[in-house]
Amino acid sequence: MAKLSTIGARTSAIGSLLPTARRRAITDGLFGGNKRWLVLGSLAWALRAYQYAVAKEEHVVYTAELKPGETLVLARQAEKTGRRKRR
């Protein structure tokens, strides 16, 4: 049986506040010059990196049973280009 899986992040009450803290860190801290948000955002980004590094849970995304002679092909789709090519 073929299985594709991805590592998932855990969700919690604090986890729901972290995206807001990361966003405000960039807008208010980095661009706005507010040192408090810069420090809090740095901690939020560090926590996210830590959670990603230690995540061990895998979530099954696709399951299929292959019969003898069948193959499973994984391919990456080409990126869509806009009107102009970027340099």
Image (cartoon, rainbow, N blue to C red):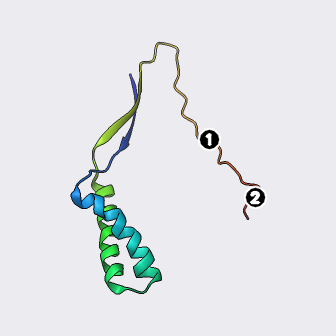
Q: Residue at x 41, y 69 (%)?
A: 23
Q: Which disc number belongs to residue 85?
A: 2
Dividing the picture into quarters, in which one does residue 38 lie? Answer: bottom left
SS at circle 1: loop
Q: Which disc number belongs to residue 77?
A: 1
Q: 25 or 86, which lies in front?
A: 25
* 31 to the left or right of 77: left
Q: Amino acid at mark 1?
A: Gln
For this orientation, the residue located farthest to the right is 84
Q: Residue 3 appears at what percent x and percent y?
A: 39, 29
Q: Residue at x 48, y 12 (%)?
A: 68
Q: 11 or 6, which lies in front?
A: 11
Q: Where 48 falls versus 26 (above or below)? A: above
- Number of callouts in the render? 2
Dividing the picture into quarters, in which one does residue 25 lie? Answer: bottom left
Q: Residue at x 71, y 51 (%)?
A: 81
Tell me whether the residue at label 2 lies in contact with that at label 1, contact meaning CB atoms closer than 8 angstroms. no
Q: Residue 58 appears at what percent x and percent y?
A: 31, 41
Which quarter of the rendered picture does the C terminus lie within?
bottom right
Q: Residue 86 appears at what percent x and percent y?
A: 72, 62
Mark 2 or 1 closer to N-term?
A: 1
Q: Where 66 falls versus 86 (above or below)? A: above
SS at circle 2: loop
Label 1 Cα crowd, 10 Å radius (few <14 / some 14-19 / many 20+): few
* 80 to the left or right of 69: right
Q: 50 or 82, which lies in front?
A: 82
Q: Residue 39 appears at what percent x and percent y?
A: 32, 80
Q: Amino acid at mark 2?
A: Lys
Dividing the picture into quarters, in which one does residue 50 lie? Answer: bottom left
